[in-house]
Amino acid sequence: MSVALSNRFQGGKAFGMLKARQERRLAEINREFLCDQKYSDEENLPEKLAAFKEKYMEFDLNNEGEIDLMSLKRMMEKLGVPKTHLEMKKMISEVTGGVSDTISYRDFVNMMLGKRSAVLKLEVQEGAGCANLELRGKLLVDCHPLDGI
């Protein structure tokens, strides 16, 4: 009896391609934030977005571009602040405005850059040391090629 496995759960080349596709998708979203005038005054925005992307990819366990309840559970445990099922559901609802059971990357970045102090934002900042962000990869985006003219 053979068991057929979906390509999205296999490792190796398929997993690498999936991660590369996810990274491109998140980089595109980062470019949108970099080009958005709303965030033009945000200090160290490219560095923050690179760190957010890295952290998000680490905890998107199903590689579908969303952090679900189990992924959030793992994130909180890894950050050293385990939460109950109910607390995590409340966190997701707070981040998404109650419209989804999963946290999209856009929701995550909006939360991290937003002025509101969501519980999840505070936990991620404390656990990830976002106050001392290091740029591990460089985002090169030319949003305003005519600046200075």
Image (cartoon, grey):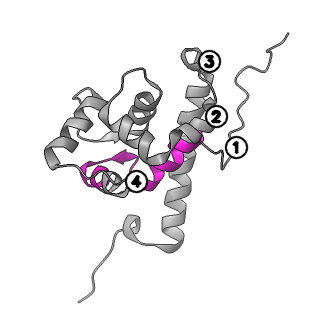
> What amino acid is found at the position of numbered circle 4 in the picture?
Phe
Q: Is disc 1 in contact with disc 2, using a CB cutoff of under 8 Å? A: yes
**Residue position marked by numbered label 3 in the rendering:** 40
Q: Residue at x 35, y 68 (%)?
A: 6
Q: Dot 4: within a 10 Å radius of its alpha carbon, few (fewer than 14), some, or many (20 or more) residues?
A: many
**Residue position marked by numbered label 1 in the rendering:** 138
Secondary structure found at label 1 = loop
**Residue position marked by numbered label 4 in the rendering:** 59
Q: Quadrant of residue 66?
A: top left
Residue 139, relative to residue 118: is it above or below?
below
Image coords of residue 93 (percent x, y) = 23, 33
Q: Quadrant of residue 88?
A: top left
Q: CA distance from mark 2 to mark 4?
A: 20 Å
Compare marks 3 and 2 and give the one earlier in the sequence: 3
- Quarter of the picture containing the C terminus is top right
> What amino acid is found at the position of numbered circle 3 in the picture?
Ser
Q: CA distance from mark 3 to mark 4?
A: 28 Å
> What amino acid is found at the position of numbered circle 1 in the picture?
Lys
Q: Is disc 3 in contact with disc 4, using a CB cutoff of under 8 Å? A: no
Compare marks 1 and 3 and give the one earlier in the sequence: 3
Q: Dot 1: within a 10 Å radius of its alpha carbon, few (fewer than 14), some, or many (20 or more) residues?
A: few
Q: CA distance from mark 1 to mark 4?
A: 21 Å
Would residue 37 be found to the left or right of residue 119 on screen? Answer: right
Residue 82 seen in the figure: yes
Q: Which mark is residue 46?
A: 2
**Residue at the right extreme, as displayed:** 149
> What amino acid is found at the position of numbered circle 2 in the picture?
Pro
